[in-house]
Amino acid sequence: MSLPKMNFPTYELEVPSTKDKITYRPFLVKEEKILLLAMEESDEAHIARALKQIVANCTFDSLDVNTMPLFDLEYIFLNIRAKSVGETADLKLLCPDDNKTYAEVSLPLNEVKVEFSKDHTNEIKVTDDITIIMAYPTYELLGMNQDEMTMEKTFKLIEDCTARVIDGETIHERADFNSEDLREFYDSLSSQQFLEVQKFFETMPRLRHKIEVINPKTKKKNKITLEGLQSFFE
C-alpha cells in the first residue's frame, strides 16, 4: 500500500527581466536539505548549485537557471523562501550615524523588488555603426558574495557578458569570435566608449531595498540600502 502524497500550495510571480508569469511552490524538506548541506560547505560553488536547484525544483523546471540573470535568480529565490519559511526577515542593521550600534528591524519580504535604473540599457552604441549587445551576468559570473571588482575581473566580466556585436548590417554572435578577438576589439575603444560599456554593469538591475531605521542609542534616523540576496538574511 503506497503512502499518501502531500499537497502543497502554488503561487504566481513575475520574472523581473522578462515580465513572464511563472508558477512556484514553497520549499519541501528535500529542498531545505539541499540548502542546509550547501551552507555547511560554506562554498560559493555549492551555494550556487543549491540555489539553482531549489529554484528549478520549486518552479517545476520551467526556467533555465543556468543562464538566468543573477537578479532574477535572487528575486525568485527570495519569494520562494518567503512562502516557505516566513514572510518577514528579522535583521540587525548597523546604523551609519555612529557605525557601531545595531538596530533590529522586521522587513516584509514582499516589499523587496528588483530595482531598474531609468538610464540603463544593454545596447551600447559605441559609434554610429557599431553597437554592443550585453547579456546580464549569471550567478557564476557575479555570485552572492561579490569580491571587490579589480580591473582584471572587470575586463573578464565584460568579455563573458558580451552577447553580440553589430557592425552596420552585420551581426557578430558570440560564437563567431573568440576571447582574443574580443579583447582586441575592446582594446581599440576610446576611454569614453569603454566607460559606456562599464555603465551597463553600474546601472544594471539589482535586488535592492531602501529602509529607514532609528538608532536605539542616538535616536537618529538612518537610511540603509540593502542589496543582493545575502543582505536579507542574517
Image (cartoon, rainbow, N blue to C red):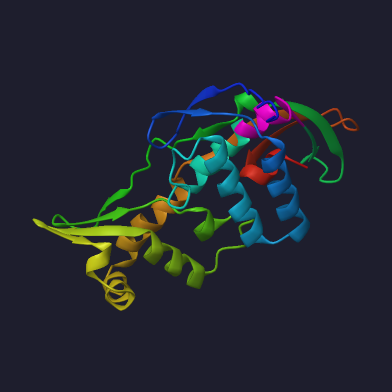
Q: Nearer the viewer, residue 69 or 208?
A: 69
- Residue 144 seen from this side: no
Residue 180 falls inside the magenta stretch: no
Q: Which residues are magenta?
A: 80-89
156 is higher (above) or lower (below) than 22: below
The residue lying furthest to the front in this view is 1
Q: Is residue 40 left or right of residue 201?
A: right
- Residue occupying the point 61% across, 32% down: 80
Q: Nearer the viewer, residue 223 or 152?
A: 152
- Residue occupying the point 76% across, 29% down: 213
- Residue 105 seen from this side: yes
- Residue occupying the point 73% across, 40% down: 233
Q: Measured from the top left, where is residue 101 in percent x and y?
A: 87, 40
Q: Is residue 106 left or right of residue 159?
A: right
The residue lying furthest to the right in this view is 217
Q: Measured from the top left, where is residue 58 in percent x and y?
A: 57, 36
Quarter of the image containing the N terminus?
top right
- Residue occupying the point 56% across, 23% down: 10
152 is higher (above) or lower (below) than 200: below
Q: Quadrant of residue 196?
A: bottom left
Q: Is residue 26 left or right of residue 187?
A: right
Residue 87 falls inside the magenta stretch: yes
Quarter of the image containing the C terminus?
top right
Q: Measured from the top left, where is residue 87 in percent x and y?
A: 70, 24
Q: Nearer the viewer, residue 120 or 175?
A: 175
Q: Is residue 234 left or right of residue 19?
A: right
Q: Measured from the top left, where is residue 9 in percent x and y?
A: 61, 21
Number of numbered discs overlaid on the protein picture: 0
